[in-house]
C-alpha cells in the first residue's frame, strides 16, 4: 500500500510518500516535498487541487493521510490551511483520512519507528508528514 502523509502549514502541503509491502517500508522518490498555494483565489485553489491530483495519479497513491490540526486555540490552523485540506478531500476517487495527533501518538507507542529519522533521507520539515503516514500504516485504521 502506498500512502501519502501530509502536514499542512500555512499555505503549504508538506508531503511524504511511504509504502508498506509485506511488512517492509520504502520511501519512494517524489518530485516534490511540498505543494504551495500561491494564489488563494478560486482559480489558485483549483490549480493546487489539479496539481495534487496529478501527483496522486502519477505515483499511484492509495491513501492520503492528513495530520489533523486544531480548529481553535493558540495552535489553530489557518483558514488557508483548511482550504487546502478541503481541496485535497474533494478530489474525486481519492481515499483521504484525517488522522489526529492522539491517534498518531497511540500508534507510534505501539509501533515505534525503528530507524532514526535522520537516516531516512528526508528533509527535517517532512518529519510530521512521515510520522503521520507511518503511524497510519502501522495502525489498525487502514486494515
Image (cartoon, helix red, strand yellow):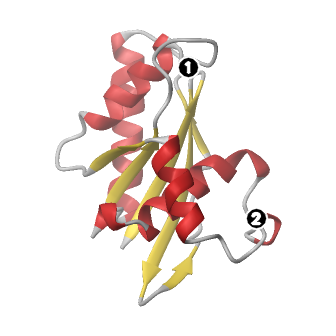
Query: Residue furthest toward the right?
Result: 118
* Callout in the foreground (1, 2): 2
- The residue lying at 52 percent from left, 24 percent from top is 37
Residue 103, x across and y down, in percent: 46, 50
Mark 1 burial class by Cα count in 10 Å: few <14, some 14-19, many 20+: few
Image vertical order of residue 33 relative to residue 71, above or below:
below
Residue 3, x across and y down, in percent: 42, 62
- Taking depth in this image into account, of 55 and 138 the one nearest to the observer is 138
Mark 2 burial class by Cα count in 10 Å: few <14, some 14-19, many 20+: some
Q: Which mark is residue 60?
A: none
Q: Is 96 positioned to the left or the right of 118 in the image?
A: left
Snapshot quadrant of residue 90: top left
- The residue lying at 32 percent from left, 60 percent from top is 141
Residue 5, x across and y down, in percent: 49, 52
- The residue lying at 41 percent from left, 50 percent from top is 65
Image vertical order of residue 43 relative to residue 137, above or below:
above
- Taking depth in this image into account, of 35 and 112 the one nearest to the observer is 112
Q: Are marks 1 and 2 in contact (CB under 8 Å)?
A: no
Q: Which mark is residue 38?
A: 1
Q: Which residue is mark 2?
A: 117
- The residue lying at 39 percent from left, 30 percent from top is 85
Q: Is 2 positioned to the left or the right of 119 in the image?
A: left
Quarter of the rendering occupied by the C terminus = bottom left
Image vertical order of residue 11 relative to residue 140, above or below:
above
Amino acid at each position: 500500500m502506498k500512502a501519502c502523509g501530509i502536514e499542512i502549514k500555512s499555505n503549504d502541503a508538506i508531503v511524504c510518500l511511504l509504502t508498506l509491502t509485506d511488512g517492509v517500508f520504502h520511501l519512494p522518490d517524489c518530485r516534490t516535498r511540498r505543494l504551495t498555494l500561491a494564489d488563494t483565489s478560486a482559480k489558485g485553489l483549483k490549480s493546487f487541487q489539479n496539481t495534487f491530483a496529478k501527483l496522486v495519479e502519477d505515483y499511484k497513491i492509495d491513501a492520503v493521510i492528513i495530520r489533523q490540526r486544531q480548529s481553535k486555540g493558540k495552535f489553530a490552523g489557518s483558514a488557508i490551511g483548511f482550504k487546502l485540506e478541503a481541496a485535497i478531500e474533494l478530489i474525486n476517487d481519492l481515499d483521504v483520512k484525517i488522522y489526529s495527533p492522539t491517534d498518531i501518538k497511540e500508534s507510534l507507542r505501539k509501533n515505534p519507528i525503528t530507524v532514526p529519522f535522520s537516516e531516512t533521507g528526508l528533509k527535517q520539515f517532512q518529519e510530521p508528514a512521515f510520522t503521520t503516514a507511518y503511524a497510519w500504516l502501522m495502525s489498525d485504521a487502514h486494515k
